[in-house]
Image (cartoon, rainbow, N blue to C red):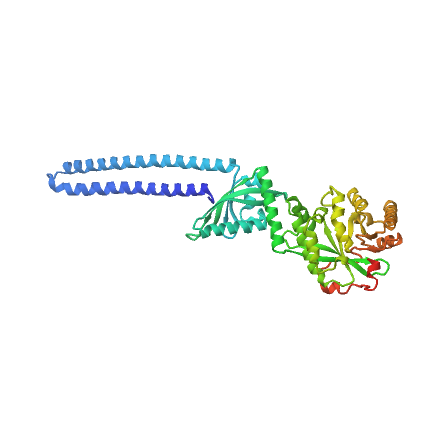
């Protein structure tokens, strides 16, 4: 499999050498036999030079004819073998050049030792670009681990063949290519390294979508079951006193690709695991909040759909953080189909002290619709409205309008994404009383950093 053409050439050259050697030996044997025959027959006939010459000459001619006939047969056989070998090489070359399946081979260290030309069509890499390179160049790390586990399990069942493994590959342009791979394990032998060789074919569109969804579900399940997420808290400040009055819980994921939290939540929602991942993130945040200063509230990001989940009340009932210190920030991952149902579901919790915040206000119509229907306790202005508010007249006017709206609806206004002293001065000048952003404090997972935050325990209710 590594190089079929080279294998055929090797066999042909070996056969040619054997044929030539056989011919030489046949001629030499003919001469030896003719000489021996002449010597043996000499005593049986009258010794005359002509008789001996005739007998010896006849035997030599007969043997030479026999050897020549044998040599001709060998030459014809050699010619037929060369024609068959050439046809086999041409056939293999045609298969390698025209097949839509990618033929490949890797050694026991995972480096490519062979690649057919289909790699350029399927993955964007010329075959010569892959030879000598690690297979992780085109196969995602977690899929490579799973493929190796499949190979190992096949070895444990005393078979070197493995088929139908779905692998997520990486195209040269960065896009994802789903393939079904089959192959065979090649043990080390005769001084040669072991490895694997096989074929991979492109999955059909629908099959690839199903494979991608299955892959996403498996990854989300791994995160949830393995608790591969943790929480960073970003402080929310009272802009008058500078004290920390609350924190926003921000999920961080343990992953090899460094994808942001939004990617994970969007992917979970797409495959029907959005609520499961949100509850896992909520439980991680509530557990970590045990070490927060007692005078701050905890803001948890939830989609409206998760707020309607019956598990919410049970999770909050078991929370180590009192309900009057918890704020649910509604995100826009899903549309709200019926605000009446959502309001009714949250009403018992709000009567017991739970507060509602609407996130990303000012970034779109959906957030304003949330505000009008839910009458939140906290309105969080989006970074897009705060960035450059000190210079943009339109943003400044909209910020002033939101301050007045919050005053009349008795909501606390939080300016998100404050990153400069000028932005802080602008929002403070407009009458905004709370804010968060890198200029005020970055997200951190360290409890020793949380302990350094200035907190006014006596005035926490008034400031929050």
Front-most of residues 75 and 131: 131
Q: Number of marks in the image?
A: 0
In the picture, the quarter occupied by the C terminus is bottom right
Q: Residue 173's spot in the image, x, y percent? A: 63, 43
Question: Residue at the location (57% across, 37% down)?
Answer: 204
Which residue is the extreme one toward the left? Answer: 46
Q: Residue at x 76, y 50 (%)?
A: 347
Q: Is residue 194 left or right of residue 385?
A: left
Relative horizontal placement of residue 243, taking residue 52 as reference (left or right): right
Res 33 quadrant in image? top left
Q: 354 and 14: which one is in front?
A: 354
Where in the figure is residue 150, as x and y percent of width and height? 50, 49
Residue 9, located in which quarter of the rendered image? top left
* Residue 317 placement: quadrant: bottom right
Q: Nearer the viewer, residue 447 or 2?
A: 447
Q: Is residue 366 above or below residue 153?
A: above
| Left or right relative to 360: residue 226 | left
Q: Is residue 369 above or below residue 289?
A: above
Q: Give coordinates of residue 229: x percent, y percent.
A: 66, 55
């Amino acid at each position: 499999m590594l190089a079929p053409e080279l294998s055929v050439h090797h066999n042909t050259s070996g056969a040619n050498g054997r044929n030539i050697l056989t011919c030489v030996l046949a001629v030499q044997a003919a001469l030896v036999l003719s000489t021996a025959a002449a010597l043996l027959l000499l005593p049986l006939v009258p010794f005359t030079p002509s008789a001996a010459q005739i007998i010896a000459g006849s035997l030599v001619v007969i043997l030479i004819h026999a050897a020549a006939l044998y040599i001709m047969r060998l030459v014809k056989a050699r010619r037929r073998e060369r024609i068959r070998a050439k046809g086999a090489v041409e056939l293999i070359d045609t298969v390698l050049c025209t097949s839509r399946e990618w033929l490949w081979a890797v050694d026991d260290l995972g480096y490519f030792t062979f690649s057919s030309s289909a790699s350029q069509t399927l993955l964007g890499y010329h075959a010569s670009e892959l030879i000598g390179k690690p297979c992780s160049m085109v196969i995602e790390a977690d899929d490579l681990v799973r493929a190796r586990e499949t190979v190992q399990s096949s070895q444990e069942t005393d078979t070197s063949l493995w088929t139908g493994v779905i692998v997520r590959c990486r195209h040269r342009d960065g896009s994802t290519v789903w393939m079904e791979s089959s192959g065979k394990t090649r043990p080390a032998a005769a001084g040669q390294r072991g490895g694997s060789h096989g074929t991979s074919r492109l999955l059909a569109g629908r099959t690839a979508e199903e494979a991608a969804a299955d892959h996403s579900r498996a990854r989300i399940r791994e995160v949830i079951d393995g608790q591969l997420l943790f929480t960073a808290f970003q402080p929310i400040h009272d802009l008058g006193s500078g004290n920390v009055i609350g924190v926003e819980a921000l999920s961080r994921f343990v992953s090899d690709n460094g994808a942001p939290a939004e990617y994970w939540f969007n992917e979970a929602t797409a495959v029907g695991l959005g609520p499961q991942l949100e509850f896992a993130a909520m439980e991680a945040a509530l557990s970590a909040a045990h070490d927060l200063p007692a005078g701050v509230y905890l803001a948890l990001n939830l989609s409206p759909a998760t707020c309607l989940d019956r598990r919410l009340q049970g999770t909050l009932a078991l929370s180590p953080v009192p309900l009057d210190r918890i704020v649910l920030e509604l995100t826009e991952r899903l549309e709200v189909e019926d605000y009446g149902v959502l309001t009714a579901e949250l009403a018992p919790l709000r009567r017991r002290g739970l507060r509602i915040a609407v996130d990303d206000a000012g970034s779109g119509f959906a957030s304003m619709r949330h505000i009008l229907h839910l009458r939140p306790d906290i309105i969080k202005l989006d970074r897009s409205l705060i960035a450059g508010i000190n210079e943009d007249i339109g943003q400044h006017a909209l910020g002033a309008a939101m301050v007045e709206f919050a005053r009349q609806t008795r909501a606390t206004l939080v300016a998100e994404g404050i990153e400069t002293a000028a932005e802080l001065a602008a929002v403070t000048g407009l009458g905004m009383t709370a804010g968060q952003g890198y200029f005020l404090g970055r997200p951190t997972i360290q409890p020793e950093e949380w302990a350094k935050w200035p907190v006014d325990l006596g005035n926490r209710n008034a400031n929050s």
